[in-house]
Image: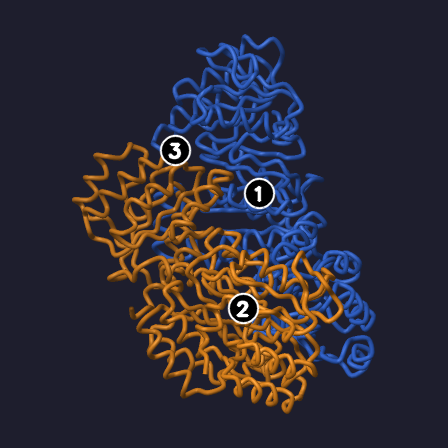
Chain colours: A blue, B orange
Amino acid sequence: MYTLKDMLHVKSIAVVGASNHSGKIGHTLLKNIIDGGFKGSIYPVNIKEDNILGYKCYKDILSIPEEIDLAVIAVPAVIVNNVIKEAGQKGAKGAIIISGGFKEIGNNDLEAEILETAEEFGMRIIGPNCQGVSYTANKMCATWPLIKEQGFIGIVSQSGTIGAALSTWAEKDEMGISCFASLGNKSDISETDFIEFFAEDPNTKVVALNLEGIQNGEVFVDVISRASQKKPIVVLKPGKTAKGMKAIASHTKSIAGNDRIFSAFCRKYGVIRANDITEFYDFCKIAGSSKKPKGNKMLIITSSGGAGIIATDTAEVNGIEIAPINEKLKKTLEDILPDQCVISNPLDLTGDATADRYDKALKAVIDDGSYDFLLTIFGDPILGANNAISKYKNDIPIIVSYLGGGEIEENEVKIMNKNNIPVFPTPERAVKAAKALLELKI
Amino acid sequence: MYTLKDMLHVKSIAVVGASNHSGKIGHTLLKNIIDGGFKGSIYPVNIKEDNILGYKCYKDILSIPEEIDLAVIAVPAVIVNNVIKEAGQKGAKGAIIISGGFKEIGNNDLEAEILETAEEFGMRIIGPNCQGVSYTANKMCATWPLIKEQGFIGIVSQSGTIGAALSTWAEKDEMGISCFASLGNKSDISETDFIEFFAEDPNTKVVALNLEGIQNGEVFVDVISRASQKKPIVVLKPGKTAKGMKAIASHTKSIAGNDRIFSAFCRKYGVIRANDITEFYDFCKIAGSSKKPKGNKMLIITSSGGAGIIATDTAEVNGIEIAPINEKLKKTLEDILPDQCVISNPLDLTGDATADRYDKALKAVIDDGSYDFLLTIFGDPILGANNAISKYKNDIPIIVSYLGGGEIEENEVKIMNKNNIPVFPTPERAVKAAKALLELKI
C-alpha cells in the first residue's frame, strides 16, 4: 500500500476529464496545476481533445507514454472505476476523485467498487465528491481556487469552502499554506490520515482541522492524542445547536455528537477550538508563529489610546491579566519616553510614536521581565513597525495588531506575515488569538 | 456663528504648519488634501518655505491673497491662538486643530483662549489634539490616512485610530465613507454636532459613532433620540470591564458610565451596539444598505453545505429563526433545481451551483413570500453572483456571504460593495449583521 505522503510527493499527474472549456472543473484543475508551478509531468486526458492549455492531450491513461504517479479525476461517476484501473496499471500511487455521484446520493456500491480496484494496485483514494488537494511544497494545486504561496498551515477540511476560504485569505495575506485537503466522502483517506501526515510533515507547523462529524471515534482520539504532542492543532467543528446538528446530518450523513464532550476532549489534549471561521484562521496563524507564553500576564503597548482600551476590555473578558507596570519599569520608561506617553498598562506611546519609540519601549519591557507576552498595537501609519517586532520576537511572544495605517499598514503587515509575526487587523482578534495560545499544551 | 456644515463645505483651505518633510504631519495633511482631489484653493502656510508639493507657500495666513474658509492647523500649541486670530481675520468659518498640548496635558487655559478667539469671529473648532476630518462629498481629506472613495458611512470617532481603521477598510472594499471625523479634545464641536449634521446630510445614510465617555448626557440623549428617527446609528463604546473603564479614564479623562444603562438606552432608541471593531464596520455596512426585515424568519441559500451549517448555528445562537421550507415551496424548488440540491433550510444548491441556479431559487423563494430575509452564501468561485443579488435586492433584504472563491470572489465582492449589497467574508459575520438589522426601529 502506498501512503498519503507518496500521493503528495508525486512527479507526474494525469488530469482525467481535463477540458478546454473554462467553466468546467476539469479545466480549472489542469490550469491550477499548471499555474501553481508543478515541476513534474502533466498529462491531460480527454477522449475528445488533442491539446489543452498547450499540453498534449491523451485519449486515455493507458496512452500516456510514461508511468504516472497520481490521477486527478473529474469524469462522470460510472467511468471512474475504469479510470482507477488504468491509473493502477500505469503505476499510480493514488487518485484524487473530484467527481460526485457516489455514496452521497446513495450509490454505495459504486463507491465500494472503486475502493476495491484501488486496493488491488495499492493505490490510495482521496474523495470521491471532494474539492481536491493542494500541497504547496510540491507546487501541486490539484484543487481550486489557485493557491501558490507556501506557508505553514496544513488544512484538512470536511467543507471544501471553509478550507478554500482559509487558503484564499492566507494567499492574500502572502502568508500561504502548506496544504489544503478537502476530503469529500472519505472512502479511503480521512482526516486522521492527514493529521498523522501533518504531524510528521516538515512543511507543516500547525494543523487546521474542520470537522463536521467523526466516523471512527477511537481512531480519532488515538491520532489526536499523539499528533497534539507534536504540532499545535486548531479545530473548527460546527453543530453546536440543534438546528446546526440537523443541518450536518443532511449535509454529510454524519452525527455531530455531544458538543460539550468534544470541548472537554479538546481541552484535555490542548487542541485549540475556534468558535468561527475567522478564529479558525487567526488561531492557526498564532499557533504556527508564536510560542506558548509562560503565564497570562500581558502588557499592551499601543500608539492608540482607544485601541488600547478595547484590547484591555477584551483581555479582561478572556481572562488575560493586564497587570500594572512595576515602579522600577515605570521609572525606566519615564526616562526613555517623551512626556506625553502614558506609563501604565496599556502603555500609550501616543499618536506620534515611531518604530524607534516602540523599539525602546519593547527593550525596556523585555529587560524588566515581568510580563509573559506582549500585545503591540500600531494604530497609526508607523513605518518600520515590522523591524521593531522582528528584533524582539524571539525573546518573548509578541502579538501584533495593526490598524488605521492606510498604505503603510498594508506594506508593514505583508512583511510581518512573510516573517511569521502574528498580526491581526483588530485588537479584539489579537487578544482572542493570544488567549488561544494559552490553551496549547506544547 | 458658523455651523459644522459650513466647515465641511469650504472652498479654500489654509494648511498651517505645512511641511516639505514627508515624515511630518503638516506634510501628510497637505498631501492628502491635494491627493484627495479637493477642488477649491489650497494654501500651504510655513514661514520657512516658498513652495510645498508644487503649491506656493505663504509666511502666514494674512499673506494669503484671498479669503480662506478653513484653517487646518499643525503647529506648536503656543502659536495656535495667533493662527486662529489670523484665520478669523481672513474670514475663516472654522479651524481643524491637529496640534496637541492643550487640555489633555493640563493646559486648560491655552484651550480656553483659542476658543475665545474663535468665538470672536464666529468660527467653529474641531480639536485640538485630533486626527482631522475627511468629508468625501467635498473631496476634503484633512486627515490621514488618505480616503478618496465616497460612500454612505458617516464616522465620528473619539479614537482617531478606530475611525481611520473603518475608513481604511471601506476604502479597500471600494465602498467608501461620507465622512470621518476625529474629535480630539472636543473644545467646541463634539459628537452630538456631527450626529445632528449626519442626520440631515444627504451624503450620509448611516452614523458610525465611536464613544469613550459622554460629556453632556442630556444633550446626548436628546440628539440621539431625534437623529435615530432619521438615520440608523451604530455605536461602538468600549469600557465594558473595570480595567477597560480605568484605561478610558487615563486616555480621555472621561467617565465611561454604567454599561448596562447605556445598553438599555441603545435598545430604547434602536441604536445598534457593536461589540467589537469588526462588528462596528459590518453593522454600518448593513444598516446603510439594507432595510429592516419585517420579522426574524430567515432562509439560508448556499452552495456550501459546511458554510450553511455554520450559518445555521450562528442564527440559532442569535435568535434568528431558520424556519423549514413549506410543502408548496419545496415542490416548486424540486421542479426547478437539479437532483443533488438539498431542499431544506439551509437550501443547499451544492458546489456546482451557478449564478443562474441562485437566480431561479431566489425567484421561487421571493414569490413564495414565507421568509422575512435571506442569507445567500456563495461558497465557490461563482461568476455573476452579484447580478443574481442585484436583481432581487429591492424585493426582500438579502444578506450575502462570499468565501472560498479566489479571484472571482474578489471581483464579485468589489461589485457588490459598489452596488450597496451587504456582503461579508464569513457566514458568522453575515448572520450577526442580519441580527443587528433587527435591532433598528426605523
- Residue A101 appears at what percent x and percent y? 37, 28
Which residue is at 24% across, 62% downward?
B294
**Which chain is disc 1 placed on?**
A
Residue B281 position (above or below residue A231): below
Using the numbered discs, state the Cα–Cα distance from disc 3 to disc 1 in whole angstroms. 22 Å
> x and y percent of residue A342 in the render?
70, 79
Marks 2 and 3 close (CB-CB < 8 Å): no
**Which of the numbered marks, if any, corresponds to residue A155?**
1
- Chain to which mark 3 belongs: B
Residue at 45%, 25% in the rendered image: A22
Question: B190 above or below B289?
Answer: below
Q: Residue at position x 54%, y 21% from top?
A: A71
Q: Residues within 10 Å of mark 2 (few under 14, many from 20)?
A: many
* Snapshot quadrant of residue B81: bottom right
Residue bearing the label numbered 3: B352
Which residue, given by chain and number where applicable, does mark 2 sit on? Answer: B133
Mark 2 or mark 3, whichever is nearer to me: 2
Estimate the x, y position of residue A206 in percent, counting from the top left: 64, 48
Residue ranking furthest to the front? B65
Q: Marks 2 and 1: which is nearer the front?
A: 2
Amino acid type at circle 3 is Asp
- Whole-number angstrom distance, CA of label 2 to CA of label 3: 47 Å
Separation of residues labelled 2 and 1 (CA atoms): 43 Å
Where residue B175 sits: x, y (%)?
46, 54
Q: Residue at x 70, y 71 (%)?
A: B59
Point out the residue furthest to the left here. Answer: B328
